[in-house]
Image: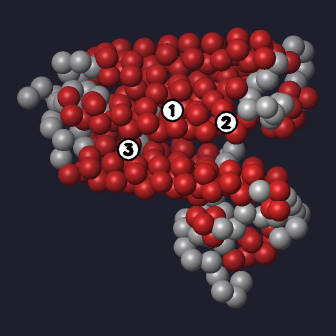
Amino acid sequence: MSPFDWSMFAAGLGWAAATALAVMLGTFALGLNLGLHRVVDVAWGVAFAAVAVVTFGLSGGQGDPGRRALVTGLTVVWGLRLAVHIARRGSGHGEDPRYEAMLARARGNRNLYALRMVYLLQGALVWLVSLPVQAAQYPPRPLSALAWAGTAVWAVGLFFEAVGDAQLTRFKADPANRGRIMDQGLWRLTRHPNYFGDFCVWWGMFLVACDGGRQAAAVSVVSPVVMSVLLINGSGKRLLERHMAGRPGWDAYMARTSAFFPRPPRRHP
């Protein structure tokens, strides 16, 4: 059995970068046409799916077919579900307030600023975060229990993301809930079930990559670490909670509900 093919992996890194760049440049052209840069959020999941499919094609005859199919399928399912959800959520709405605030600070051409600070930055993150997906394609060793453990962690993450998103969508659709804080279903266990789900998805992907051996694990570990930092201390939880601060009922919700990892709400916060 041949070892991890570093030369093929290195070539795949270039193709993955080109794929992420192509998706983001195409989305930038669409955003200019629509006058909405929020479309980049839809492209996030699509770009991961595209990188997985391209890397799967490049790794034919190199890695274990079972692991290649598994990691590609997990990525495509996660990425396309997220893309469809975000597209539906944003349908009929104007520009995302986050991007409006960012572009208001732009010096010079706002669209070129958006290209640099939104599209190209997200494309670079797709390339970096997708390292477990890329690395898992090349190890020749057959699947073992570790890959299925990673799949189980991924499934927990997808459950929290998909169910949490669906619960929040239904909650917001009810006019009686206008101005209220969502504290039902999974949102009773954590203030951010979708972010916790994303956290599990990428640690699960990392375990699938680890199943291929130490080399794949070594080049992949940066992915879940970066995602964890972004979700907890970056553009995820921290930014959203700053936006929610001061809303009626938010302080009480914070006091009784876990900040990130799910647990039953406190009875006496």
Alpha carbon distance from label 1 to label 2: 12 Å
Residue 233 vs residue 29, the one in the foreground? 29
Q: Going from the N terminus, do you reach mark 1 or mark 2 first?
A: 1
Classify mark 2: residues with Cα within 10 Å, few (<14), some (14-19) or many (20+).
few
Q: Position of residue 25 (x, y in %)?
A: 64, 13
Tell me the quadrant of the picture where the C terminus can be found: bottom right
Disc sitting over residue 118 in the figure = none
- Which residue reaches farthest bottom? 268
Say which residue label 1 marks. Answer: 80
252, above or below 67, in the image: below
Alpha carbon distance from label 3 to label 1: 19 Å
The three-letter amino acid code for the residue at tag 3 is Phe
- Please indicate, yes or no, whether residue 233 appears anywhere in the rendered image: no
Looking at the image, is mark 3 or mark 2 nearer the viewer?
A: 2
Residue name at image x 63 percent, y 30 percent: 42
Residue name at image x 35 percent, y 31 percent: 72
Say which residue label 3 marks. Answer: 206
Q: Position of residue 161 (x, y in %)?
A: 54, 51
Looking at the image, is mark 3 or mark 1 nearer the viewer?
A: 1
Disc sitting over residue 88 in the figure = 2
- Please indicate, yes or no, whether residue 18 appears anywhere in the rendered image: yes
